[in-house]
Image: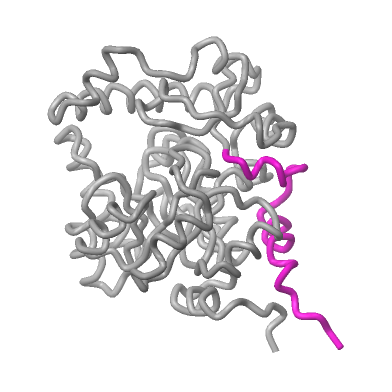
Amino acid sequence: MSEYQLPVTAQKFVDLLGIDYPVIGGPMCPCSNPELVAAVSAAGGLGVLQPISMTYVYGHDFREGIRLVRRLTDKPIGLNALIEKSSKKYQERMSQWIDIALEEGIRFFVTSLGKPDWVAERVHAVDGLVYHDVTELKWAKIGLDNGADGLICVNDRAGGHAGARSVQALYDELESLDVPLVCAGGVGDSQGLGEALNIGYSACQLGTRFIASSECQASDVYKKAIIKARESDIVLSERITGVPVAVINTDYIKKSGLKSGWLARWMLSGNRSKHWMRTIYALKSIWQLKKSSLDESGERDYWQAGKSVAGIDSVQSCEQIMNNLMEIFRTKKP
């Protein structure tokens, strides 16, 4: 008899992916260092690589970074593919990263910000799976019409690029699509995991909880800020990428404000100019994230986090985190 009794939908998900627990380590730039990804998978979940974090932030050759993770664990891992049309050079690089990931045996992909058709075509050719990031029904239908096998459902409690709907409301909106739904946002403890899976989600994707882990290479001051923060300390800033991003309301955020300037808003409203503006934002934000998230001085206190901070009170190993998350499903011995 299994040590844990999972809801049926969650059990189907772990059986499908060949993992132990219905927990995905969300891809984060800059916090998804290879050691963290490996630790999440080794602990029984599914760690997901973030290629910009792997190469730009931590300086690994992409293929060698995957092989580093493989040396640390033989459990399944995934790859995040941001597929929005931006610069031609970036698109070519993302295409190469996907091919390398497939060559290295990765079979689970999380796509974001575009139509996943071309990714799904390559992944399905080797019997892999593509799950697409969505915040509402419109994007979900586009993702599924373009080959997605399941959906990462980003709600209003998520860190980073948060959605607008609650955990329950987003599930109710997407349930009829009859595909696996992964809850992304607001889950940092066993109670939150249990509530989401009992609603009907197949799994939960966690980011903030794994930043406050011993394997994550984010700075100690960042981790302490997560532990100290309350739910009310999480705010949405448009000044980082042009769209709302959930961050801790630090001194830096208070000084810079939460709204984009008029020029940025104007450029983001145009069909052509929005791609240029998003590229500018991306380059700026990646540099800021790298500097702030790894800086032990705390002077650059720009830290992404979701409302799951309310349930995080210590830095733990990924194994400890996973054991605590699964406590609610532990089978009680007679």
Residue 224 in percent (x, y) is at 72, 31
Q: Height in image: 43 above or below 68?
A: below
In the rendered structure, does residue 276 fall within the stretch colored magenta? no
Q: Is residue 81 left or right of residue 256?
A: left
Q: Is residue 239 or residue 130 the one in the foreground?
A: 239
Q: Is residue 91 left or right of residue 229?
A: left
Q: Quadrant of residue 307?
A: top right
Q: Is residue 299 or residue 68 the one in the foreground?
A: 299
Q: Quadrant of residue 189?
A: bottom right
Q: Is residue 308 left or right of residue 201?
A: right
Q: Is residue 292 left or right of residue 224?
A: left
Residue at 68% over, 27% down: 221
Q: Quadrant of residue 143?
A: bottom left
Q: Tell me, what colour scheme is on the image?
A: one colour
Residue at 47% over, 52% down: 68
Q: Dividing the image into 4 quarters, which one contains the C terminus?
A: bottom right
Q: Is residue 161 or residue 321 the one in the foreground?
A: 161
In the rendered structure, does residue 309 fall within the stretch colored magenta? yes
Residue 71 in percent (x, y) is at 51, 59
Which residue range is magenta in the image?
306-334
Residue 292 in percent (x, y) is at 54, 23
Q: Height in image: 241 above or below 310?
A: above
Q: Dividing the image into 4 quarters, which one contains the N terminus?
A: bottom right
Residue at 41% over, 24% down: 238
Residue 129 in percent (x, y) is at 33, 68
Q: Is residue 270 or residue 126 the one in the foreground?
A: 270
